[in-house]
Image (cartoon, rainbow, N blue to C red):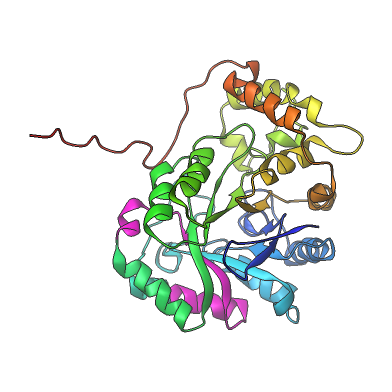
Amino acid sequence: MQFRTYKNTDLTVSEVGFGLWTVSTGWWGQFTEGEAIALMHKAFDLGITLFDAADTYGNGLSEELIAKAFPTQRDEIVIATKVGYDFVTHGETRGRGQREIPQDFSPAAIVHATEAALQRLKTDRIDLLQLHNIRMEQIYDDAVWTALDQLKADGKIRHYGVALGPAIGWLFEGVNAIRERPVTSVQHIYNILEQHPGCAMHEAAADAGKDTMFLIRVTHSSGMLEGKYTPETVFPPNDHRNHRPRSWLLNGVKKVEQLRFLEGPDRTLGQAALQWLLADERVASTLPNIYEEAQLIEFARAPETPRLSDDEMVRVAELYRNNFGAEAEEPKFKGTMELPAEPAAA
C-alpha cells in the first residue's frame, strides 16, 4: 500500500480506501455484521487505513461497523464520514431507488449529527467530516461553515470537506466549494469512462491555487471497469445496477474492450483503473466499491502494480475523446452544470 497526505495538513490516507456504502446499505447485496467486519479487517491487514462512512448509510450502521471492527486501533485508521440527511426523521435512502430523503444543513443539525456520529463511532474526533451531497445554497451560507469551523476548534473534527452527488454531475457545487471555502477534500464520481465533470473540478482547484484534494468514488463505473461484465450479465433484483437501462451494459462492455491494452500479467484492468486515477497528484485516495474478498485483495494491491505509462495515458485520452468507439449517449448530469449568463452591461 502507498499513502498520500492532503496538502498543508497532517491527514495521511491510504491510496485505496474502503467505502462502507457497499456493506451497510443493501445496494450491493446483503452482508451480515460478521461478513462486513471480516472484509474491513482484511482491508486493514492489506494496508488500507481510510474508512469512509456516512450517518445515513444503514441509519448509522456504517459508523457502528467501524467502531466494532476497530475498537483498539483508533490511532491506526482514518475515519471519514458524512452528515446532511435527516434520516432520523425520514428514514434512510435504502429501498427508495434514486429518491432522496430531506436534507438539513442548519448549523444545529450539523452539530447534532456530528455528535451523534461520534457516539456511534465511539471516538472523540472525526478525521474528515464531509457535507453529504451539498447543494449550492449551503456553499454560500456562512453559517454552515462557521459551524464546521467551531467543530474543528472544539476538536470534534480534524478536517472538513464536501461529498458530491448522489449521481454524476454537480460541477459548480464542487468548483464553487473549492473557490469559496477552505475545503480540505472533495469527494466525487470520477473514472476512465466518466471523466466529466471530475476533471474540470481538479483543474479548477489548480487554477484557483487551492490545496483541495479529492476522494474518488465510483472508480470502476459501477463495476464496468473491473472488466467482468458481458452482454449476458444479469444483476440481482435488489442490486442498484439492475435498474440501469440495458444500453448502459451493452455500451459499457464495448468501451471496456477498447481498454484491454491496460491489463497484463502484472496488472488487471481493475487495478489499471485505479492507477489511472492515481496518476493525478490531486487524488488523495480512491474508494472502489468493495463487496468480496478477492476483489478487495485485487484493489488493495493496485498501488503496487506498474503505473500507467505516458503512452497509455495518451491512448486513454484519445479513446475518451472518441467515446471509446461506442454509440454516442446523451449525458445525464445532476446539479449545477451551467451558470446563469451575466447580465449585459448597460
Q: Residue 182 at what x, y percent from top left?
A: 43, 63
Q: Which of the pair 254/129 is nearer the observer?
A: 129
19 relative to 334 in the view: left or right: right
Residue 31 falls in which quadrant of the image? bottom right
Residue 163: tell me if it is visible. yes
321 relative to 299 in the view: left or right: left
282 over 72 or under it: above or below: above
Residue 233: tell me if it is visible. no
Q: Which residues are magenta?
A: 112-140
Q: Is residue 139 magenta?
A: yes
Across the whole image, how many numbered discs are drawn on residues? 0
Quadrant where the C terminus sits is top left
Please tell me which residue is depicted at 38% across the width and 72% down the height of the picture: 109
Q: Is residue 276 magenta?
A: no
Quadrant where the N terminus sits is bottom right
328 over 55 or under it: above or below: above
Q: Residue 143 at what x, y percent from top left?
A: 30, 69
Q: Which of the pair 60/195 is nearer the observer?
A: 195
Please tell me which residue is depicted at 57% across the width and 79% down the height of the picture: 125
Please tell me which residue is depicted at 36% across the width and 64% down the height of the picture: 104
Q: Residue furthest right?
A: 265
Please tell me which residue is depicted at 62% across the width and 81% down the height of the picture: 122
87 relative to 230 in the view: left or right: left
Q: Residue 115 at what x, y percent from top left?
A: 48, 79
Residue 133 falls in which quadrant of the image? bottom left
Q: Residue 211 at what x, y percent from top left?
A: 52, 58
280 over 252 or under it: above or below: below
